[in-house]
Amino acid sequence: MEAITDLIKQLNGIVWGPVMLVLILGTGLVLMIGLKGMPLAKLGYGFKMLWRGRDGDKNDGDISPFNALMTSLSATIGTGNIAGVATAIFLGGPGALFWMWMTALVGMATKYAEAVLAVHYRETDENGNRIGGPMYYIKNGLGKRFTWLATTFAVFGALAGFGIGNTIQANSVADVLSSNLGINPWLTGIVMAILVALVLLGGIKRIAIVAGKLVPFMAIAYVLAGIVILAMHATQLPATFDLIFTYAFTPIAATGGFAGAAVWAAIRFGVARGVFSNEAGLGSAPIAHAAAQTNSPVRQGTIAMIGTFIDTIIVCSITGLVIIVSGAWTSGETGASLSSLAFESVLPGLGGAVVAIGLCVFAFTTILGWSIYGEKCVTYLFGVRSIIPFRILWIVAVPLGATANLEFIWLVADTLNALMALPNLIALLLLSPVVFKLTREYFRKAEA
């Protein structure tokens, strides 16, 4: 086991090296420049389109644009927002939060482009459902020469789902319930597996309905609790932001239980955990947006980019700011335990419960959302006959993840995320002229 861990660590160091970080941030920057800052300028327009609802024939898609976003958010708002942010700060210091923000800002353009291409190049499967995502926009947009790239994404996407979207989520829930309530991880895993199975039987439509109700409620409750804490420490916020901006560009010495970190650690873990949280560039979210009831790729793209803003700029920021402003970041704790300590230290008896409940709900909806992504990747590779075997494996993985080693699972998931992102980022750069053209035409008509 030690040899396997060392091998994955070496691979992780390569795939999350300077080239990958430049590719993730660079792709977002290229798209943002090519779109002339549209994702930032049209953020309000995206919210307007979200509340307007579906815009096309009801049969031209399987779920509403709102539920497409909620399904996407159900997969992105998970342990990355609670445990992932805490891990980034533990490993990279307060400056890691700055690099998470930078990843999110350019990631809005990346997420927009992914959704535009997903809707533009989507297909209809044997069961009459709308399907799309990187494997389809690579195949239909780049042609037969790049079929291998589409297959590569589907393989890594299917595998990555069992890490980022399943075992890590189950493990984090088991960890927080065990430390807070003393519940056996096996029991947590089995109960979660049963709940996941009950929802999974209904397919994407039932998952979208559940996500559409659970995600907004829990996200608002979590953010409100965080705002209360920040309001209580309002006088310390200027110093908190000073820490974030200072240590984004300068090394930080060891203090308390914090081991110290170089600037490279702040950048690496800020970007890596930022991508883990908002998934911009991974190619996962467009799989959900491809099922939206819409005739307009651009319109759905403006809705999709909101997801990155909500996930990182709002939810992750709340977690990160509470951890820093409370002083918990120097405690030596990491993961969900660090977030729980930060909230509990300010709101005794309530803060820890908010984190525990929030993590459970977020992780549960993430498992549901990622089941769609993994299922569509497997369907692309093996056809609709693979859906039932995949769902069985997905359910079985939940209790296994709940009892596995957390450090090893994070390592594997991190590595698979990078391998999944590579083919998608290449495709986004090659197909960026299509995104720019569709965007120009749409807004030219909208403004006419």
Image: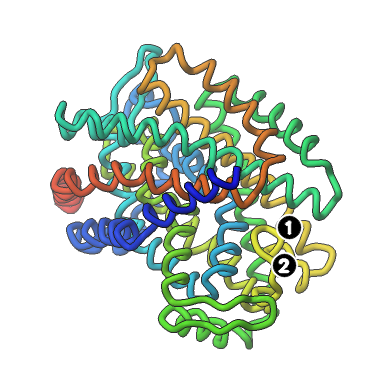
Q: List the residue tagged with mark 1.
A: 354
Q: Is residue 307 visible?
A: no
Where, by quadrant of the figure, is residue 103 drawn? bottom left
- At mark 2, the secondary structure is helix
Residue that appears at 60% across and 82% down: 254
Residue that appears at 73% across and 57% down: 354
Q: How many dots with numbers?
A: 2
Residue that appears at 51% across and 45% down: 412
Left or right: 365 with respect to 104?
A: right
Q: List the residue tagged with mark 2.
A: 343
Point out residue 219 in the picture as x, y percentages from the top left corner.
Answer: 60, 53
Point out residue 34 in the picture as x, y percentages from the top left corner.
Answer: 17, 58
Where, by quadrant of the figure, is residue 210 drawn? top right
- Which residue is nearer to you in this view: 52 or 411? 411
**CB within 8 Å, label 1 to label 2:** yes
Amino acid residing under circle 2: Phe
- Which residue is nearer to you in this view: 390 or 117? 390
Point out residue 439 in the picture as x, y percentages from the top left corner.
Answer: 19, 48
Q: Residue furthest front?
A: 3
- Image quarter where the N terminus lies is top right
Amino acid residing under circle 1: Val
Where, by quadrant of the figure, is residue 234 drawn? bottom right
Point out residue 14 in the picture as x, y percentages from the top left corner.
Answer: 37, 55
Left or right: 109 with respect to 362?
A: left
Left or right: 250 with respect to 433?
A: right
Residue that appears at 48% across and 30% down: 372
Q: Residues within 10 Å of mark 1 (few under 14, many from 20)?
A: many
The answer to which of marks 1 and 2 sits earlier in the sequence is 2
On screen, residue 335 above or below 91 = above
Q: How far, Cα to Cα, is label 1 from label 2?
A: 8 Å
- At mark 1, the secondary structure is helix
